């Protein structure tokens, strides 16, 4: 075991406490609770950005439908 490895463990323990020592290799599960307030905020931001992207797509689609309906009514 190297000095660097022990130093890294101590630093993680001081920053995050016991959850900081958990194995974080691989992808996190969607339902897994965040380890820190910062992680929780980052997850919330990502969720809101995804929701915002979907709402913008829905708005653009509705605008396009409205435009096509107006164009169709004009041609008749």
Image (cartoon, helix red, strand yellow):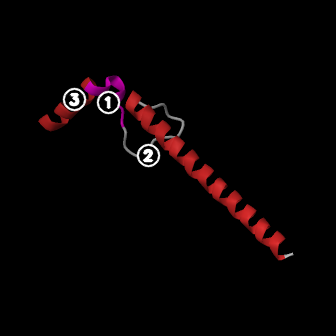
Task: Indicate which disc, 2 or 3, sits on the residue closer to the N terminus.
Answer: 3
Q: Secondary structure at mark 2?
A: loop
Lateral position of residue 66 relative to residue 17, left or right: right
Alpha carbon distance from label 2 to label 3: 22 Å
In the picture of the structure, the residue carrying the numbered disc 2 is 27
- Binning the other alpha carbons within 10 Å of mark 2 as few (below 14), some (14 to 19) or many (20 upward) gives few
Magenta-highlighted residues: 15-23
Residue that appears at 53% across and 42% down: 47
Lateral position of residue 76 relative to residue 54, left or right: right
Determine which quarter of the picture holds residue 70.
bottom right
Alpha carbon distance from label 1 to label 2: 16 Å
Q: Is 18 in the magenta?
A: yes
The residue positioned farthest toward the front in the image shown = 74
Alpha carbon distance from label 1 to label 3: 10 Å
In the picture of the structure, the residue carrying the numbered disc 1 is 21
Residue that appears at 37% across and 43% down: 25
């Amino acid at each position: 075991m190297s000095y660097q490895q022990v130093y890294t463990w101590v630093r993680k323990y001081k920053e995050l406490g016991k959850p900081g020592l958990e194995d974080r290799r691989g992808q996190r599960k969607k339902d897994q609770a965040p380890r820190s307030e910062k992680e929780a905020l980052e997850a919330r931001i990502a969720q809101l950005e995804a929701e915002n992207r979907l709402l913008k797509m829905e708005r653009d689609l509705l605008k396009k439908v409205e435009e096509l309906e107006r164009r169709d009514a004009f041609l008749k």
